[in-house]
Amino acid sequence: MTIRHERDENLKGVPLEDIMERYTKSIKDIDPDWHAFADSDIEGLRRAQHRFIGAGGSGKFDDPSFIPASHFTLSVMFIPPGQGGSAHSHEVEEVFFVLQGVMTFFLEDEDGRRISKRLGKWECISCPAGVLHGFVNEGVEPAYLQTLIGTGRPGPVGFSDARIFEMEQAKLAAQAAGSATKAMDVPAE
Protein backbone atom coordinates (compact mmCIF):
# COMPACT_ATOMS: atom_id res chain seq x y z
CA MET A 1 0.00 0.00 0.00
CA THR A 2 1.25 3.50 -0.80
CA ILE A 3 0.60 6.43 1.51
CA ARG A 4 0.78 9.53 -0.64
CA HIS A 5 1.20 12.15 2.07
CA GLU A 6 3.68 12.29 4.92
CA ARG A 7 2.53 12.36 8.51
CA ASP A 8 3.13 15.48 10.52
CA GLU A 9 6.56 15.37 12.11
CA ASN A 10 5.12 14.86 15.62
CA LEU A 11 3.23 11.74 14.46
CA LYS A 12 6.03 9.92 12.63
CA GLY A 13 6.51 6.52 14.21
CA VAL A 14 3.46 6.88 16.48
CA PRO A 15 1.34 3.68 16.53
CA LEU A 16 -2.15 3.91 15.02
CA GLU A 17 -3.67 2.92 18.37
CA ASP A 18 -2.09 5.98 20.02
CA ILE A 19 -3.23 8.26 17.20
CA MET A 20 -6.79 6.89 17.41
CA GLU A 21 -6.86 7.43 21.19
CA ARG A 22 -5.45 10.98 21.07
CA TYR A 23 -7.46 12.15 18.05
CA THR A 24 -10.91 10.90 19.11
CA LYS A 25 -13.25 12.81 21.44
CA SER A 26 -16.80 12.41 22.74
CA ILE A 27 -18.89 15.23 24.19
CA LYS A 28 -19.58 13.06 27.25
CA ASP A 29 -15.86 13.28 28.07
CA ILE A 30 -15.65 17.08 27.75
CA ASP A 31 -16.39 19.36 30.69
CA PRO A 32 -18.32 22.42 29.47
CA ASP A 33 -16.28 25.59 30.01
CA TRP A 34 -18.65 28.35 31.16
CA HIS A 35 -15.69 30.78 31.50
CA ALA A 36 -14.09 30.27 28.09
CA PHE A 37 -14.49 33.89 26.99
CA ALA A 38 -14.11 37.27 28.66
CA ASP A 39 -17.81 38.01 28.21
CA SER A 40 -19.08 34.58 29.36
CA ASP A 41 -19.77 35.81 32.90
CA ILE A 42 -21.96 38.71 31.75
CA GLU A 43 -25.73 38.16 31.89
CA GLY A 44 -27.05 37.80 28.35
CA LEU A 45 -23.72 36.43 27.13
CA ARG A 46 -23.46 33.18 29.10
CA ARG A 47 -22.53 30.12 27.11
CA ALA A 48 -20.44 26.99 27.51
CA GLN A 49 -17.71 25.85 25.15
CA HIS A 50 -16.99 22.15 24.60
CA ARG A 51 -13.52 22.04 23.00
CA PHE A 52 -13.03 19.15 20.56
CA ILE A 53 -10.11 20.26 18.36
CA GLY A 54 -7.89 23.03 19.68
CA ALA A 55 -8.67 25.78 22.15
CA GLY A 56 -10.97 27.69 19.82
CA GLY A 57 -11.13 31.35 20.77
CA SER A 58 -10.69 30.57 24.48
CA GLY A 59 -6.91 31.04 24.47
CA LYS A 60 -6.60 27.97 26.73
CA PHE A 61 -3.86 26.42 24.57
CA ASP A 62 -2.31 24.45 27.44
CA ASP A 63 -5.46 22.39 28.03
CA PRO A 64 -4.35 18.81 27.21
CA SER A 65 -7.91 17.48 26.96
CA PHE A 66 -8.73 18.57 23.40
CA ILE A 67 -7.54 17.02 20.16
CA PRO A 68 -4.42 18.89 18.96
CA ALA A 69 -5.18 21.51 16.32
CA SER A 70 -3.01 22.20 13.29
CA HIS A 71 -4.99 24.31 10.84
CA PHE A 72 -8.43 24.89 12.39
CA THR A 73 -10.33 24.51 15.67
CA LEU A 74 -13.69 22.88 16.30
CA SER A 75 -15.86 23.30 19.35
CA VAL A 76 -19.52 23.01 20.28
CA MET A 77 -21.18 25.79 22.23
CA PHE A 78 -24.23 25.39 24.44
CA ILE A 79 -26.32 28.58 24.57
CA PRO A 80 -29.31 28.82 26.93
CA PRO A 81 -32.31 30.92 25.83
CA GLY A 82 -31.66 34.65 26.15
CA GLN A 83 -27.87 34.24 26.04
CA GLY A 84 -25.33 34.71 23.27
CA GLY A 85 -21.98 36.13 22.25
CA SER A 86 -21.09 39.81 21.94
CA ALA A 87 -19.81 41.52 18.80
CA HIS A 88 -16.29 40.37 17.99
CA SER A 89 -13.96 39.58 15.12
CA HIS A 90 -11.07 37.21 14.44
CA GLU A 91 -7.97 37.37 12.26
CA VAL A 92 -9.40 34.43 10.25
CA GLU A 93 -12.88 33.23 9.32
CA GLU A 94 -15.20 31.72 11.93
CA VAL A 95 -18.04 29.37 10.99
CA PHE A 96 -21.14 28.63 13.07
CA PHE A 97 -23.30 25.61 12.24
CA VAL A 98 -26.58 25.26 14.17
CA LEU A 99 -26.90 21.70 15.49
CA GLN A 100 -29.99 22.29 17.65
CA GLY A 101 -32.27 25.23 18.34
CA VAL A 102 -32.69 28.58 16.65
CA MET A 103 -30.10 31.37 16.80
CA THR A 104 -30.05 34.94 15.59
CA PHE A 105 -26.67 35.92 14.14
CA PHE A 106 -25.64 39.48 13.44
CA LEU A 107 -22.97 41.31 11.48
CA GLU A 108 -21.95 44.84 12.40
CA ASP A 109 -19.90 47.52 10.69
CA GLU A 110 -17.59 50.16 12.20
CA ASP A 111 -20.47 52.65 12.32
CA GLY A 112 -22.56 50.32 14.51
CA ARG A 113 -24.99 49.35 11.74
CA ARG A 114 -26.23 45.84 12.43
CA ILE A 115 -28.00 43.30 10.27
CA SER A 116 -29.39 40.03 11.64
CA LYS A 117 -30.50 36.68 10.34
CA ARG A 118 -32.24 33.88 12.20
CA LEU A 119 -30.85 30.39 11.54
CA GLY A 120 -32.15 27.00 12.63
CA LYS A 121 -30.98 23.42 12.72
CA TRP A 122 -28.60 22.45 9.89
CA GLU A 123 -28.02 26.06 8.79
CA CYS A 124 -24.72 27.90 9.00
CA ILE A 125 -23.00 31.24 8.66
CA SER A 126 -19.36 31.90 7.81
CA CYS A 127 -18.02 35.14 9.25
CA PRO A 128 -15.05 36.48 7.23
CA ALA A 129 -11.88 37.70 8.94
CA GLY A 130 -12.21 41.20 10.39
CA VAL A 131 -16.03 41.32 10.19
CA LEU A 132 -17.75 41.99 13.52
CA HIS A 133 -20.26 39.28 14.34
CA GLY A 134 -22.16 37.81 17.26
CA PHE A 135 -25.23 35.82 18.13
CA VAL A 136 -28.11 35.44 20.56
CA ASN A 137 -30.48 32.62 21.35
CA GLU A 138 -33.86 34.35 21.03
CA GLY A 139 -35.68 31.00 21.07
CA VAL A 140 -37.27 29.19 23.99
CA GLU A 141 -35.04 26.08 23.79
CA PRO A 142 -31.30 25.76 24.46
CA ALA A 143 -29.16 25.77 21.32
CA TYR A 144 -26.01 23.95 20.29
CA LEU A 145 -23.64 25.49 17.75
CA GLN A 146 -20.68 23.84 16.08
CA THR A 147 -17.94 26.45 15.75
CA LEU A 148 -14.87 26.32 13.52
CA ILE A 149 -12.06 28.88 13.44
CA GLY A 150 -9.70 28.87 10.47
CA THR A 151 -6.41 28.50 12.36
CA GLY A 152 -5.13 26.01 14.89
CA ARG A 153 -4.13 28.75 17.34
CA PRO A 154 -6.44 31.77 17.06
CA GLY A 155 -5.29 35.14 18.31
CA PRO A 156 -7.22 37.06 20.95
CA VAL A 157 -10.93 37.49 20.34
CA GLY A 158 -11.40 41.03 18.98
CA PHE A 159 -14.34 42.14 21.12
CA SER A 160 -15.71 45.48 19.88
CA ASP A 161 -16.67 46.56 23.43
CA ALA A 162 -13.49 48.09 24.90
CA ARG A 163 -14.30 46.93 28.44
CA ILE A 164 -14.79 43.32 27.35
CA PHE A 165 -11.65 43.47 25.16
CA GLU A 166 -9.63 44.67 28.18
CA MET A 167 -11.10 41.80 30.23
CA GLU A 168 -10.03 39.40 27.46
CA GLN A 169 -6.48 40.79 27.45
CA ALA A 170 -6.27 40.41 31.26
CA LYS A 171 -7.64 36.84 31.08
CA LEU A 172 -5.07 35.85 28.45
CA ALA A 173 -2.23 37.47 30.43
CA ALA A 174 -3.28 35.55 33.56
CA GLN A 175 -3.42 32.29 31.58
CA ALA A 176 0.05 32.96 30.14
CA ALA A 177 1.42 33.71 33.60
CA GLY A 178 -0.15 30.51 34.92
CA SER A 179 1.42 28.53 32.07
CA ALA A 180 4.83 30.03 32.81
CA THR A 181 4.45 29.14 36.49
CA LYS A 182 3.45 25.57 35.62
CA ALA A 183 6.48 25.24 33.32
CA MET A 184 8.79 26.31 36.16
CA ASP A 185 7.22 23.68 38.46
CA VAL A 186 8.04 20.80 36.10
CA PRO A 187 10.91 18.77 37.57
CA ALA A 188 13.96 18.32 35.39
CA GLU A 189 14.51 14.80 34.02
Image (cartoon, helix red, strand yellow):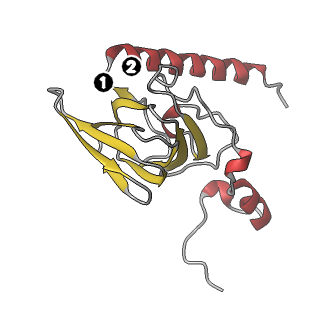
Task: Give the side of residue 111 with respect to residue 179, left or right.
Answer: left
Q: Which of marks 1 and 2 is nearer the N terminus?
A: 1
Classify residue 183 by image quadrant: top right
Q: Residue furthest front?
A: 140
Q: What residue type is labelled 1?
A: Ser
Nearer to the camera, 80 or 97: 80
Nearer to the camera, 12 or 132: 132
Q: Residue at x 69, y 43 (%)?
A: 30
Separation (CA) of disc 1 from disc 2:
7 Å
Q: Which amino acid does label 2 sit on?
A: Phe
Q: Which residue is drawn at 41% across and 32% down?
A: 85
Nearer to the camera, 20 or 124: 124
Dot 2 lies on which element?
A: helix
Q: Position of residue 112 (x, y in %)?
A: 18, 27
Q: Position of residue 16 (x, y in %)?
A: 75, 66
134 relative to 148, above or below: above
- Circle 2 residues within 10 Å: few <14, some 14–19, many ≥20: some
Nearer to the camera, 169 or 81: 81
Q: Do the residues labelled 1 and 2 touch (CB within 8 Å)?
A: yes
- Circle 1 residues within 10 Å: few <14, some 14–19, many ≥20: some
Q: Which residue is drawn at 76% across and 57% down?
A: 21
Dot 1 lies on which element?
A: loop
Q: Position of residue 50 (x, y in %)?
A: 60, 42
Q: Which residue is drawn at 68% across and 61% down?
A: 12
Residue 130 visible at all: no
Residue identified by numbered label 2: 165
Residue 119 visible at all: yes
Q: Residue 160 carries which label?
A: 1
Task: Give the side of residue 157 with respect to residue 1, left or right.
Answer: left
